[in-house]
Amino acid sequence: MTKCLDQLLFQFYAKNDGLRITDLHQGIVWGTHTAQTRRHAQLINRFDYDGDYGTVLNRFLIQAAIGYPLTVHGTGGQTRAFIHIQDSVRCIELALKSPPAKGDRVKIFNQMTETHRVRDLAELVAKITGARIAWLPNPRKEAAENDLVVRNEQFLKLGLNPTTLAEGLLEEVIEVAKKYAYRVDRSRIPAVSAWTKDIEPVIERDPEGKRLKSVG
């Protein structure tokens, strides 16, 4: 609802008030460093990993770092879009340098560089780290499989040179996860929130067999 309302408001203000508006459709950001954050350890980016709000790649990397099974919910057939943090910053720079003209429609950019199914992502992390995969019931009410058809030609034409998971930079994030593994709160890793009451009973145990208090 919020995203749909945003689109309508952007359209209204661009047409009615002549505002020049650029809308960035953000994919899941991965990676921990930019050239600036490498200057000091305290500048490292936030790393959300909890089962309810953490991004799927961060969750897998933290799980691998502490010897916790990679939690794939349902079939893992949900497709997600990803972008490295350095590319995300670069996309904002490119968008600022290429604004719409006054009176133009809202300019929309897909701020992503690649897509992966959740199960493929888990298999990639498992191959690199040796972690095992745990297949769990899905606490969300969503299709078991979905195809995400998304393109980023506009950013490519503006000069974006994408960084992909296959380029080895995933190792950097794994090292960061291992370095700070002692700070991980294991109780926050399992997903404990169910989207509907009928789903709630199936998420009462985490992959380590511990009883959870699920929330409907």
Image (cartoon, rainbow, N blue to C red):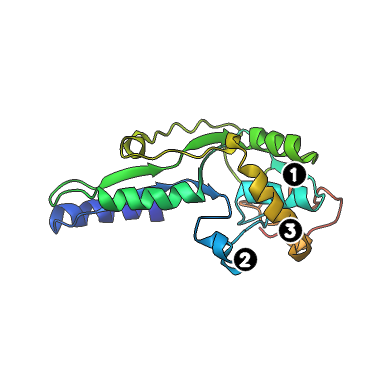
Q: Are marks 3 and 2 in contact (CB under 8 Å)?
A: no
Is disc 1 surrounded by few (<14), some (14 to 19) or many (20+) residues within 10 Å?
many
Q: CA distance from mark 3 to mark 2?
A: 12 Å
Secondary structure beneath dot 3 equals helix
Q: Point out the residue furthest to the front here.
A: 39
Q: Quadrant of the C terminus?
A: bottom right
Secondary structure beneath dot 1 equals strand
Q: Residue at x 73, y 61 (%)?
A: 180
Q: Are marks 3 and 1 in contact (CB under 8 Å)?
A: no
Identify the residue under disc 2: 41
Q: Earlier in the sequence, mark 3 or mark 2?
A: 2
Identify the residue under disc 3: 179
Q: Point out the residue furthest to the bottom here.
A: 42
Q: Amino acid at mark 1?
A: Leu
Q: Earlier in the sequence, mark 1 or mark 2?
A: 2
Q: Earlier in the sequence, mark 3 or mark 1?
A: 1
Residues 162 and 114: in front is 162
Where is residue 51, by image quadrant? bottom right
Secondary structure beneath dot 2 equals helix
Q: Nearer the viewer, mark 3 or mark 2?
A: 2
Where residue 65 sits: x, y (%)? 77, 51
Where residue 112 sits: x, y (%)? 45, 41
Identify the residue under disc 1: 70
Where is residue 137, by image quadrant? top right
Is disc 3 surrounded by few (<14), some (14 to 19) or many (20+) residues within 10 Å?
few
Q: Amino acid at mark 2?
A: Ala
Q: CA distance from mark 3 to mark 1?
A: 18 Å
Q: CA distance from mark 1 to mark 2?
A: 27 Å
Q: Residue at x 48, y 45 (%)?
A: 27
